[in-house]
Amino acid sequence: MAVETTHMRKFLNEPAKVVKESLAGLAAAHPDLVRYDAAAQIIVRRDAPRKGKVALISGGGSGHEPLHGGFVGLGMLDAACPGEVFTSPVPAQMLAATKAVDGGAGVVHIVKNYTGDVLNFKLAAEDAADEGIKVTSVVIDDDVAVQDSLYTAGRRGVGATVLAEKIAGAAAEGGADLAKVTDIVKRVNDRARSFGVALSSCVPPASGKPIFDLPEGQIELGIGIHGEPGRKRATLGHAAEIVDVMVEAVISDLKPRSGAKLLAFVNGMGGTPLLELYLLYGEVDKKLRAAGVEPARNLVGSYITSLEMAGASLTVLELDEELTRLWDAPVHTPALRWGA
Amino acid sequence: MDAATIATWMHGIDVVMREEKDHLVQLDAAIGDGDHGTNMTRGFEAVVQALDADSSSPPGKLLILAGRTLVGTVGGASGPLWGSALRSGGRVLGDQPTFDGVQLVEVLAAALASVKDLGTASVGDKTMVDALEPAVETLRARLSGGASVADALRDAGDAAEAGMRSTIPLQARKGRASYLGERSIGHQDPGATSTALIIRALQRAVAQAS
């Protein structure tokens, strides 16, 4: 039986078990790629630990699927630590994941900039260091909708997380050392910017209620990935007008050099179909070219989501030769696969 | 006050978090992501289970056990923050079997210090510190002015609630609410609210003990 409230119809058995049951399903669907350690609540690459390879782990609240569990596999993450829906995992999960994947070359923690994620990963990194494992941590904070100042928790980590996991994962697969892989994650974060727009809220399974209500004809500009409202509301205009806002927000902040090659990532928030995402990409492609930069690579699809929220985010990453080569390198995970 | 006081306090928090769960979820949905009530309930349910299985530890060790349990079960920001707070508070008591009002102030002051350190928050940032710091200061001031522990805790509870209400007009500068900028103004902070509930639960636990 599914679970239904006034605001929610979801495929659930018990709302409190949704994360564990979904992770078990992920492992059942991809036994060649990953295994699920139910006791530790972590998804681990099938062949981990790989001796001599730098390992990458990430984690965060659930509700953003396929992030992060769907990105465990060849050329990307070695383990993922999923917390409850929209709630960061606990340090014991990150420690278990770190120990499960450490092949002696060190472990990189990729952390999205949310207070909970940062605090829990910090405690876990201290525990791992106590056990003699070399750990570096990189905090991803690419969301230009948040003012980065002393008066906020800083920019959120959103779409750049996916790109950093793919690109640094390829570097690690190719034999780069801990310092190099860490540097690649930082470079991707430094050269990436994101901006999101919501057309609807989403409904966390535990509460069964939407996080916010959007009046008819209104959209939220500058949203994150936890169903939180954005920085401001605006009137729903044409897709082309919304893309204008998104492109302007990321490009004015990134300030790419003229003629730069970019990776343009149009991401669905969970409730927006590919029909609309490709429409958005078409607009993004035109506007980037008009702005004097070249969308040399792209990714279109729902990769870092907010449950069933209707909406989309745009992430742009300024590429160089090395980042491009690493992006093109083979990847084989439940949610992303090419060249392997 | 002794280990039973701590156990009563933690049970009291467990009860009040369940009672106030929907309220905390509502407050958090307005300026965060709506999970605060669920997280605190899950955490303190685990804390009372852990404490019920331990009938021999002194009060400081029980606080450390409670803190470790919160870090291990809650996630989010409130898990590490309250977890570190209770662990730091527990360390103040060492192995001693009982504690007095002055030592209770030191426990709460250590808890406050660890929250401020880990969360890098100060009064006025629209966080749990807005409730916890005035509670600790009031408790300290009233006790040194000669008040009984029960009276001082009642006033500390009032101070925590006043601090909780003081978050309404503030713009959040820490945590997820800070992403909203000016839109966070006009909402009561959920972390300050659960903190006021925790101080009230302490007041009731101590009243029961005396």
Image (cartoon, rainbow, N blue to C red):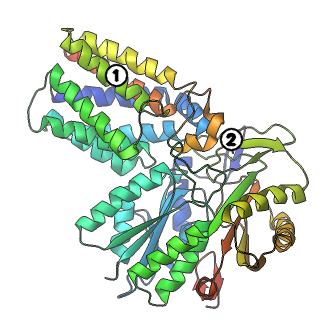
Residue A181 relative to residue A166: left or right: left
Coordinates of residue A197 in the picture (x, y in percent): 75, 53
Instruction: Return the mark for residue B108.
Output: none
Residue B115 relative to residue A73: left or right: left
Question: Which residue: 36% across, 46% down?
Answer: B118
Question: Which residue: 51% across, 47% down?
Answer: A153
Coordinates of residue A231 in the picture (x, y in percent): 69, 44
Amino acid found under the numbered disc labelled 1: Ala
- Name the one closer to the observer, A118 or A27: A118
Q: Which of label 2 and label 1 is nearer to you?
A: 1
Return the residue found at the far front.
A258
Chain under numbered label 2? A
- Name the one closer to the observer, A208 or B201: B201
Return the residue found at the far right.
A238
Chain under numbered label 1? B
**Residue at the disc numbered 2:** A210
Instruction: Return the mark for residue B135.
Output: 1
Let me know if residue A268 appears in the view: no
Question: Which residue: 52% across, 26% down?
Answer: B167
Residue A118 relative to residue A205: left or right: left
SS for dot 2: loop
Q: Quadrant of the C terminus of chain A?
A: bottom right
Q: Neighbour class for label 2 at 10 Å: few (<14), some, many (≥20)? A: some
Q: Give the Cα separation between the discs numbered 2 and 1.
A: 34 Å
Residue A206 relative to residue A269: left or right: left
Amino acid found under the numbered disc labelled 2: Pro
